[in-house]
Image: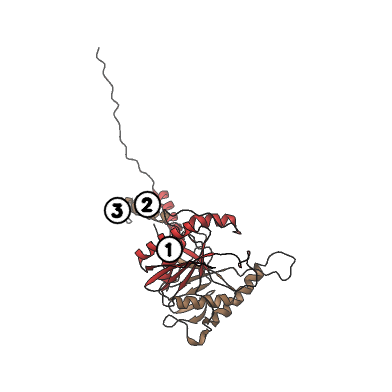
Chain colours: A red, B brown
Amino acid sequence: MSRKKKRRKIEYKDIDLNIMPFIDVFSMLNTFLLFTAVFLSVGILEVQIPFLSNTPPPDDPKDSRVFEVKVDVTKEQVEIQTAYTRPPNQEQKFPFPNNADGLKQMHQKLAEIRKQNADTDKATVFSEDDVSWESLSAVLDTVMLRIEGDPIFPPAKDAKNREKAEIDAKLYLYPKIVMGSVMLR
Amino acid sequence: MASAGGGSKDTLSLNLNPMLDIFSILITFLLMSFSTDPVSHDVDAGIELPQSNTIVAMDEVPTIIVTKTELRVNDNKVADIVAGDVPEKDRAQGAIYPVFEALQKLAEANKRVNKPKSDDPNAKGSTGALTMEMDKGHRFKLMKRIMLSAQQAEFVQFKLMVQKELN
């Protein structure tokens, strides 16, 4: 018994899709996005300057021997200087050329120093007058910011805002930067 | 879809597909670059910011703007900049006197606003941080003068504006 399959013939019809509402929505979205578009993303680098205060420091500095990290910036060179505030000072200097490679090496050295002295979260930056803001900002980036591979150091025990300190610990290698050269003549 | 005017009965079909393609690409680009930063600020046309890897977004509009030719505090011009420095007449002890004056007023206002709620009448509020927008070509000498002026007006925290590098 042969069975004939009935094949249904598909009929194609021309349908007219109304895309006008679609275009209207796109136009509105475009206008809104163009108005709110920010083509330049702006960020900030937080620094502080030294100041004189009558308030006594939280712990007596007479007996404490604190490790200090300083970064000296000139047009040609950046130099890390480390020392203790009381003898034996154990002063050390690590110079690097002020260029992309030099800054990369300096960051590695700073990470190493921070590993050995995890409690020191402050670095003081001294700059010469003729250094451009572009060059100085590159140095600040290198000193301040963590890069991939850097360990995360616990926030300072005496941090006032614990939550902020914990976020800062993830972002920064040295969260506190003091511009040491800003002193009244 | 669109028909030509006049007496002709011919219908013109306008091909909208290329326009839709352009719209789609434009919207994709705009949605990708859509900023959710807390503050939207247009950088001054005369300023080029240095690039930085920071991910900290700007949270307030800049108080101090240093273009190539002028220095502004709260959008009021306080000094000219000639050859990358302020003129001799505006300088005092390495600082910039008009900047100090403008910032001193601001510091007093900030202290009043930020005064802690305590019974102590001598309790002082903090001056807060200063946001500074500065052209990348300026030297540290000028930045130091501004920072010194701010220091004299009791500002010690600075937020230096930079251009975030797009990864």
Q: Which residue appears at 56% of the width and 58% of the height?
A: A156
In terms of sequence position, does the residue under pointer 3 or pointer 2 come before the other?
Answer: 3
Q: Amino acid at mark 1?
A: Thr
Residue that numbered label 1 is attached to: A142
Residue that numbered label 2 is attached to: B24
Q: Amino acid at mark 2?
A: Ser
Looking at the picture, do discs 3 and 2 lie on one chain? yes
Residue A147, x across and y down, in percent: 42, 57
Residue that numbered label 3 is attached to: B8
Q: Chain of mark 1?
A: A
* Disc 2 packing (10 Å; few <14; some 14–19; many ≥20): some
Examine the rendered structure and indicate whether residue B140 appears above or below residue B93. Answer: above
Q: Is residue B42 visible?
A: no
- Total number of numbered labels? 3
Q: Which residue appears at 36% of the width and 65% of the height?
A: A102
Task: Place residue B155 in its image quadrant.
Answer: bottom right
Q: Quick one: SS at disc 3?
A: loop
Instruction: Pick out the residue farthest to the bottom.
Output: B89
